[in-house]
Image (cartoon, helix red, strand yellow):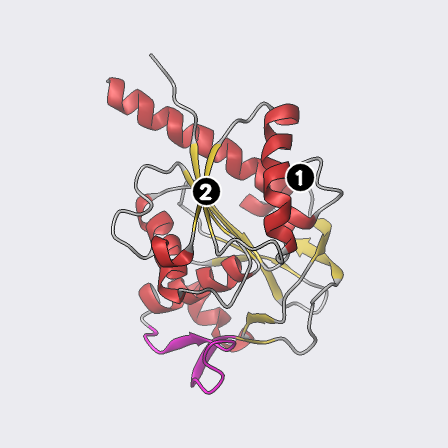
Amino acid sequence: MTYLTPRLALVGDRSPAVRSHARVPGLLDALADHDHLVLDAYWIPTGDAAAPGALDGFDAIWLLPGSPYRSEAGALAAVRTARERGIPFLGTCAGFQHAVLEYARDVCGLAGAVHGEEHPDGEHQVIAPLACSLVGHEGAVTVSPGSLAEQVLGTTRTQERYHCAYGVDGSYLERLSAHGLRFSGADDSGEARILELPGHPFFLASLFQPELSGDGTRAHPMVRALAMAAVAHADAATATAGA
């Protein structure tokens, strides 16, 4: 049986001005060199991600930072595609924010849910300005025991880097959680920093940017876990096709 290289969709509006985007090629090399996890990665602009079939055939989707996206619809389509089809998903920074937004609209039935950066006058700002901007900051995150996040990170306490000014409005957490979304990491003030979707093969997102961890020569555990999930997805697809 021939196994194909897993295909990774890097969804975002690639820019040399976004530090996390500049880190990605090196992280992919590190996954191959140090972890023996080789991925066939393609950048998909958010405008293209909105098109029907744009993400067909991918074994994992990474919704990268860089908001406001050129196409909010494309970013949300990437989240929905991964969520509904069981495709491994990682969302970082704006990817986390839009994972929350998609879930609020499409699962919780909150049609008027908006991102405060794009709709500052919107009534239901599920993603709202943080009380204190985290642009350029680093902070501790406490991880829920028994969560996917703990399994991936190997700890219940981690120090991570941020570059954002928006997060989840806490008044919506109960509704989101009641519909199945799990917030499995928080900062020292209790603000949500990691989310996951129980029952999904791999669905994880963080407000912090794991791609900024260290000096970029080794992949953060969350990035490595996405790669491993992509390999498992590709292997399962190949096995099904050969059955």
User: x%, y% of residue 112?
Assistant: 35, 78
Residue ID at (32%, 57%): 50
Q: Nearer the viewer, residue 204 or 186?
A: 204
Residue 115, above or below 96: below
Observer able to see residue 197: yes
Residue 64, above or below 201: below
**In the structure shown, which secondary structural element does the residue marked by tag 1 occupy?**
loop
- Membership of 114 in magenta stretch: yes
Q: Nearer the viewer, residue 73 or 235?
A: 73
Q: Amino acid at mark 1?
A: Gly
Reading the image, the residue beneath label 2 is: 202
Q: Residue furthest top?
A: 1
Q: Which span of residues is magenta-colored?
A: 110-127
Q: Quadrant of the C terminus?
A: top left
Question: Is 50 placed left or right of 178 in the picture?
Answer: left
Q: Residues within 10 Å of mark 1 (few under 14, many from 20)?
A: few
Residue ID at (51%, 64%): 97
Q: Amino acid at mark 2?
A: Phe
Q: Quadrant for residue 165, please give it.
A: bottom right
Q: Main secondary structure of the magenta part?
A: loop
Reading the image, the residue beneath label 1 is: 154
**What's the CA distance linking mark 2 and mark 1?**
16 Å
Q: Nearer the viewer, residue 70 or 64?
A: 70
User: x%, y% of residue 195?
Assistant: 53, 56
The answer to which of marks 2 and 1 sits earlier in the sequence is 1
Observer able to see residue 144: no
Residue ID at (43%, 67%): 101
User: x%, y% of residue 35?
Assistant: 62, 26
The reply to whether callout 2 and callout 1 are in contact (CB within 8 Å) is no
